[in-house]
Image: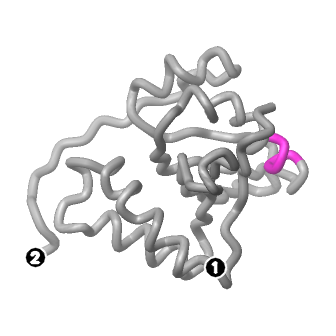
């Protein structure tokens, strides 16, 4: 475990100010998917409504500067609870990727049965050494730009 990193879930009272810091990171991670900022707006509304959660990884050596933000969603089918990492953006991945076990420990402590990471294909290679396996694939095709 890297003792220089602080891994924390952002509390409701700090969410608005933390979102200001996290938003540009998440927006960059969304890339082409963020048509008309609709995805970013959806994420922000989900965080404020409480069905999405914002996490940060901060580096003590850099005055607790964030090096990663994650957004998770809790999903339940019956009694089977899954913690889903929906969006993740960061720098210096080699510093924090091994800390994925901390998220697993938090999920286990809170009664979850599974952690899923939803993302681009590159995550498969990065997370395979940590025991993650591909379970499904999503294909998409944009047929209309904008919300109108």
Res 3 → quadrant = top right
| Residue 27 painted magenta | no
Secondary structure at badge 2 equals: loop
Secondary structure at badge 1 equals: helix
In screen coordinates, is 11 left or right of 127?
right
Q: Residue at x 56, y 39 (%)?
A: 117
**Residue 42 screen position, x and y as percent:** 39, 71
**Residue 45 screen position, x and y as percent:** 45, 78
Residue denoted by label 1: 14
Front-most of 20 and 74? 20
The C terminus lies in quadrant? bottom left
Which colouring convention does the figure follow? one colour
Which mark, residue 137? none
The N terminus lies in quadrant? top right
Which mark, residue 148? 2
Front-most of 81 and 84? 84
Q: How many marks?
A: 2
Q: Are marks 1 and 2 in contact (CB under 8 Å)?
A: no
Give the magenta part as a residue range.
104-108
Label 2 crowding class (10 Å Cα cut-off): few <14, some 14-19, many 20+? few
In screen coordinates, is 50 left or right of 22?
right
Task: Give me the C-alpha separation between circle 1 and circle 2.
Answer: 34 Å
**Residue 48 screen position, x and y as percent:** 54, 81
Query: Main SS type for the magenta part?
Result: helix
**Residue 110 screen position, x and y as percent:** 86, 56
Instruction: Say which of marks 1 and 2 sits in front.
Output: 1
Q: Residue at x 60, y 71 (%)?
A: 51
In screen coordinates, is 141 left or right of 61?
left
Please tell me whether residue 123 is drawn above or below residue 36 in the rendered image.
above
Please tell me whether residue 97 is drawn above or below residue 141 in the rendered image.
above
């Amino acid at each position: 475990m890297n003792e220089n990193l602080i891994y924390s879930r952002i509390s409701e009272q700090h969410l608005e100010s933390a979102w200001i810091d996290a938003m540009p990171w998440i927006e960059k991670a969304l890339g082409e998917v963020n048509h008309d900022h609709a995805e970013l707006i959806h994420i922000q509304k989900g965080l404020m409504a409480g069905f999405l959660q914002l996490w940060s990884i901060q580096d003590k050596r850099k005055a607790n500067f964030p090096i990663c933000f994650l957004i998770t969603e809790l999903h339940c089918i019956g009694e089977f609870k899954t913690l889903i990492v929906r969006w993740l953006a960061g720098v210096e991945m080699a510093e924090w990727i091994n800390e994925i076990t901390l998220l697993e420990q938090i999920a286990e402590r809170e009664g979850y049965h599974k952690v899923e990471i939803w993302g681009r294909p590159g995550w498969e290679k990065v997370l395979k050494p940590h025991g993650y396996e591909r379970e499904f694939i999503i294909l998409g095709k944009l047929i209309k730009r904008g919300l109108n």
